[in-house]
Amino acid sequence: MGPLVVNEVISENTNLLLAFFIGIAFGFVLEQGGFSSSRKLAGVFYGYDTVVLKVFFTGAITAMLGLLFFSLFGWVDLSLVYVNETFLWSTLVGGVIMGAGFIMGGYCPGTSFCGAAIGKIDAYIFIIGLFIGVFIFGEAYNLLEPLYMAEFWGSPRISEYFGISEGVTVLVVILAAVAMFWGAEWAEKLFPRDEY
Amino acid sequence: METQKKPKKYMNPYLAGVLLGLVVVAANFVSGRGLGASGAVKSAIVAGVETIAPKHADASPFYHKYSEAHQGKPLNNWLVYQMLGVVVGGFFSGVISRRLTWKVEHNPGIKSKTRLIFALAGGILFGLGSQLGRGCTSGSALSGMAVLSLGGFLSMAAIFGTAFMLAYFFRKLWI
């Protein structure tokens, strides 16, 4: 059955319309979770508010498990689902640059649009920064291309990389997430702050 | 007259996480792909450069490859529609929870101007990094991890690891 657009159950235009509705759900959940506030987001790096860690990892393990169940029930063919490519160096260097942007700017791209939606002026400035940053990459592309294309590993799943089953992989991630949730609850008691 | 009510509390983070995960599952079920955010900014930049400087856009593979992949309509992209939805959904959530206000949110220990300067710098870095890393926290880390992509896990570790390591140096911005 799924993915619906790949199996031509729905048309490309319907797919784009559904993207809009999926976006509404995405933005609604982010804002309800507190991701429209940079001070809440940055809190995870100081232990006073670990909402990022809780929402992010609960989201990740729910999505992993959900997709495994959907596959088990025959609702989605996981071989037709896009798996992000791994270009080792650009992933790591890009991630380091994004991490620096996160601690300085207090937002990531998705959350900045969410903050802007409820009137956060700092989020608008962050978004202007995003446009400048993407433009700089575009202009410097020829210079950055060797790094961008280096160490292409294809699209391996982490389960394939370590040679373990997908189910066991997800179980390990869930156990790691539960350990982090425990640490997060402990940190919030250690560094209490008022809600923003 | 109705008195001004306080904003409602945020949702329980674990419940928000489960709902977020279900949105990722829905995106994969419907469209065979995950969520994203930085990709929509890229679409807008490619469309802008093509309109303002078409020759310049043709000369650079960053612009023209992307445009070709979208039949010359870089804005007619899944992530652009999804991000429009994010703004609508975020706004709707802000309305029902009474959180709509124009403000520069910052730690009382710093000036608004300082917050805005760092917001701009952070945005520039995030924009640049998201292109190099082929996606941001949503597209690469969250959605990548959802399909167990090795790159997704590496991306998550690099983003959060770096932010933790640099947290000490930027502590005055936040605490």
Image (tube, helix red, strand yellow):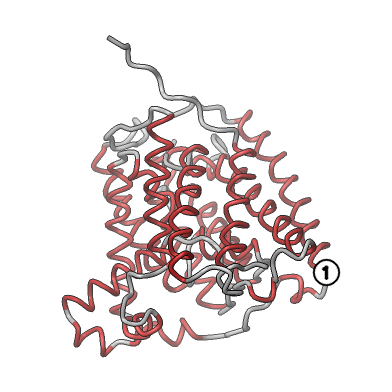
Instruction: Name the chain under label 1.
Output: A
User: Which one is in front, A22 or A35?
Assistant: A22
Q: Amino acid at mark 1?
A: Ser
Q: Is residue A50 above or below residue B42?
A: above
SS type, badge 1: loop
Q: Where is residue B134? Give x, y as percent.
A: 48, 72
Q: Residue at x 75, y 52 (%)?
A: A174
Give how far across and how far down residue B93 sits, in percent: 43, 37
| Residue at left offset 38%, top offset 17% | B5
- Residue marked by disc 1: A165
Name the residue rendered at 51%, 63% in the picture. B139
A40 relative to A103, above or below:
above
Report whether B103 appears left or right of A3: left
Position in image of residue B98 (x %, y %): 38, 27
**Quadrant in which residue B174 is drawn:** top left
With respect to residue B2, does A98 lie above or below?
Answer: below
